[in-house]
Amino acid sequence: MSAVLTPRTDSPEAPAASVDTTSAWSRWANDHRKWLFAAPAMAFVAVLIIFPVAWTGYLSLTDAEGSVRAESEFIGFQNYLDVLTDTDRFWPAVWRTVLFTGVVLFFEVILGMAIALLLWRPFRGEKWVRVAILLPLVATPVAVGMMWRLIFDPNIGMANQLLGWIGIGPQPWLAGQHSALPTTMFIDIWQWTPMVVLILLAGLTSLSDEPQEAARIDGASSWQRFRHVTLPLLMPTVIVAVLLRGIDALKTFDILYATKGRGGGSFHEVETLNVYAYGLSFDYNDYGVSSTVLIIFFLIIIGVMWALTYRKKGLGR
Amino acid sequence: MRRRPIIGTSLAVVVAMSLAACGGDGGGEDSKTVRVTLVNHVWTENIKKVLPEFEKQSGLTVEVTQLGEDQLSDQYNVKLNAGSDDLDVMMYRPLQEGKLFAKNKYLADLSERVKSDSAFEIGDFQAGPMQATTYEDNIVGLPIITEQEVLYYRKDLLTKSGFTAPPKTLDELKAQAAKIEADNPGVAGFVARTGKAAAVTQFSSFLFSFGGDFVDASGKATVNTEQAKQAYAYYGGLLRDHGPENISTDMSWSEAMAIFTQGKAAFYTEANSLYKNATDPTKSKVVDSVGFAAFPAGPAGSKPYNIPSWALGVNDSSENKDNAWKFIQWAAGKEQALAQQTAGVPGARTSVWANPASTATLPKDLAEANTVSTANGVGHDRPLVVKVAQAREIVGQPIVDAITGKDAASSADTANAAFQKFLDDEAK
């Protein structure tokens, strides 16, 4: 190595000669090292993101079923036509996905904001309260689903026993055709509100005290300070929380699967787009149609992400 | 300052290290391991206890992956679709996935190996189960567990209500369930699976006993015949009128069994292979009072299913087929079949059924019920199609409609039209 790095003094041509001994490949690699170092990351994106999406897109244009290795026929946009005109499973699943996302987001942000405001100022036992609030967040969603499934069992579950002690009759909870979706929403809110608390609390603690002080000196009430000072300053953080939770809520699968099983229940009462696509793949082995649903779902998520990011940029100006 | 030409060298090292990491035991023909994927089942627990014996006599190491039924099915879907060779022996459901797997050529043809091994004695397997593991004249699996539907009941509740024997007919079942329910507030007369797809297999015995079936001899859908409509109305009505108070339409065997074993139901129709859940003191509160009886007779007699519920097959992409076959030879062999049946898991070998020792450890009434069910049994408990999960959802819809009080007959008509379309599509 020293022979390469140390300039030879016996001849002014020596340094050039030492470079000539280096292979053309090494010189090329040296010249393009910024690309070479980025290559693993680019390969990662290509293999784990671009290829699966492209492959799913291709499958959505075929009648692949049974096995993805079996021969399938290119059928153009027939699957898209079938799926978009399916009012039996697809559109109800879209509606449930939107409803689920909207309701849980609304409650998680409202509750998250309320809890974050309560935790904002120091108080005795603050650490314990924070730990207790964050506990649901660290549990695995499938385990959470199984736990609530037991609690909400209409015959031997704890929820109906507790209601019985205070004189309220048993409720169907997850078992009811119309109560199952609200019950799964409750479970999602229980598990994920702490995440919103965490994000909003980080936003609140980073706010400057001066505007609050000024408003207080001007005689603003607590509500007025929240409405006209805290909330506008916190808005970019709120949008981040909505963005993160919104995308997550759109994709919710594990809680629904763990509580209602395949198909989202006997009447598909909690079947969202994700659950529907899973059933098409793993129960029906209908890979063409399943891929179509996933591509449409992918486009919906991209659209929502774009809309929320656009809104965040607007607020940031 | 000149750039140091180190990038090319670094990349070469990384590539070399990556290639070196690709070595190791890939489970090829010279492998000393066999990778076995099994479902959570009493059979699996029994076989795991004696695996060291097999490892000692064969010199192989067995790597067991044990999963729940749904997870097992999902893993097969992913791995077999990808052509993965890291599954050697697969425990699978011949009636649920058998046709799909065989059609997709996921299961290796074991015909030559089976026929060339006289000690294995393929002729000893019952014809029905063997038919379910044979595809286009090729043996693609060996049945290891059979199931028959029987009636679980509470002896103490029957006695309290003045009944001296369990019901012999479906009419008696309804009458006894109603009387016991009236005599014991908080206890349901009857419980069974209610989930749309999950209930289909247990409902099948009711369907057969009413004289119906899912498909007729010419392959036409028959879930809206008069017999089928009566069966749907009976099963759904029994659960609606005499089932648990807050009945759901999502119960699989685990939920229904929990209600029965917690002492909250008098009668329960279920697979006999699950009987230990009711007789194990750690799982059941009704150990001392549980009784078993043959499936009650309907207008067409007592016709419970008698099916091969699980089989062992070899992944066609495995490069370790010789070792996989050695494992199956042992696990599905006569000796293990007898040991399993003696431990309460019904098998598919005729010689084992003929041996009184194989049922000596079973509760006496369960052994009698098994004998009756095996004699009268029908060889399937779900439509025999490729996309079984989809078919179960279609023919299961009238069950949940009947439970929730909708018109079962009209639902059966709708289901029949959908099922016929499904059959036509699959035949294309």
Image: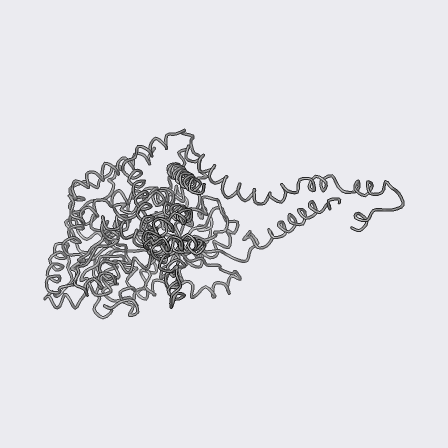
| Residue A49: x %, y % from top left | 49, 42
Residue placed furthest toward the top: A76
Q: Is residue A267 above or below residue A213?
A: above
| Residue B414: x %, y % from top left | 21, 38
Could you say which is closer to the camera, residue B189 or residue B104?
B189
Residue A19 placement, left or right of A188 = right
Q: How is the image coloured?
A: one colour
* Residue at screen point 41% across, 54% down: A204
In this rendering, does residue A101 appear at all? yes
Q: Is residue A33 above or below residue B162?
A: above
| Residue B42: x %, y % from top left | 35, 62
Residue placed furthest toward the front: A218
| Residue A245: x %, y % from top left | 39, 49
Quadrant where the image shows the N terminus of chain B: top right
Could you say which is closer to the camera, residue B116 or residue B166?
B166
Quadrant where the image shows the C terminus of chain B: top left
* Residue at screen point 44% across, 38% down: A56
Residue B370 placement, left or right of B133 = left
Q: How many marks?
A: 0
Could you say which is closer to the camera, residue A89 or residue A182?
A182
Could you say which is closer to the camera, residue B49 or residue B395?
B395
Residue B112 placement, left or right of B302 = right
In this rendering, does residue B143 appear at all? no
